[in-house]
Image: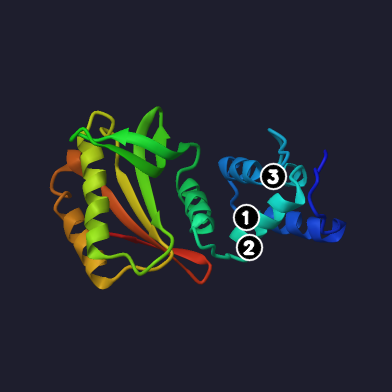
Amino acid sequence: MSRGNFPTFGASKTGTFVSTLKNYNLPPFILEKIAADCKSDLVRKGRIEERLQSMNDSALELLHKVFVDCHEDSSGVYANYRFFAYISSMFHKCEILLNEKIPGHSGKVYKVPIAVKNNGMYIAVGFNKSSGGPTTKREAIKFYEMVDDIKKGEHGNQLSEGVFGSSVGFDGEALVTLEKLSTTRKKDPQNKIDFKTASFQDRIYSVTKC
């Protein structure tokens, strides 16, 4: 499989990347996205190790930066990749959709960074704040209102989870506000949504149910 006109790191470094990355949660859509970003080949099927070996050095280096070294970039793309992979690990055998446009009850169409479908129905949506200051009360309310509007719409009948991820933390007001808003729904089983916050610190996600 050709590696194209990319600088090579040598067989030993490439082999090290592959042997390390094969132990990480790297869903197919992440491999496909990074392969496209790096103009890399990628075999369509096979074991994770075989798929990684088919990728060029630039793609392997980027995967290593994102998932092993946990580097950050100014645009927050690396953090979003980690968040998307994490969401995927929470919903096995479900369909994962990126930048999905979902209409709410109000008629507004939301561009949702990551959505999860099961049997053709949306069951979860997620948003990640990858840069800037800690997540604020205003941002928490905006997220809640988006999920609530989608839930009330014709496409949200089965929606049961909203996950707000952050690589920059949450301020106290944001967490308290989201918890209060979430609590008000629990009296109505048909309207219930489990809101969760996912903070990425020290190379791991810490999830709290609101």
State the separation of the CA atoms marked 3 and 1: 10 Å
Q: Quadrant of residue 139?
A: bottom left
Residue 153: image location, x then y, percent: 22, 32
Query: What residue is pinned by disc 2?
Result: 68
| Dot 1 alpha-carbon crowd within 10 angstroms: few under 14, some 14 to 19, many 20 or more | few
Q: In the structure shown, which secondary structural element does the residue marked by tag 2 occupy?
A: helix
Q: Quadrant of residue 123?
A: top left
The residue mark sitting in front, 3 or 2, is 2
Residue 164: image location, x then y, percent: 35, 55
State the separation of the CA atoms marked 3 and 2: 16 Å
**Dot 3 amino acid type:** Ile
- Could you say which is closer to the camera, residue 73 or residue 199? 73
**Dot 1 amino acid type:** Tyr
The residue mark sitting in front, 2 or 1, is 2
Please, is residue 155 above or below residue 10 in the view? above
Query: What residue is pinned by disc 3?
Result: 48
Q: In the structure shown, which secondary structural element does the residue marked by tag 3 occupy?
A: helix
Residue 135: image location, x then y, percent: 32, 65
Residue at image location 68% in from the left, 33% down from the top = 44
* Label ID, residue 141: none
Q: Can I make out residue 191 in this image?
A: yes
Please, is residue 106 above or below residue 12 in the view? above
State the separation of the CA atoms marked 2 and 1: 8 Å
Tags 2 and 1 in contact by the CB under 8 Å rule?
Answer: yes
Query: What residue is pinned by disc 1?
Result: 24
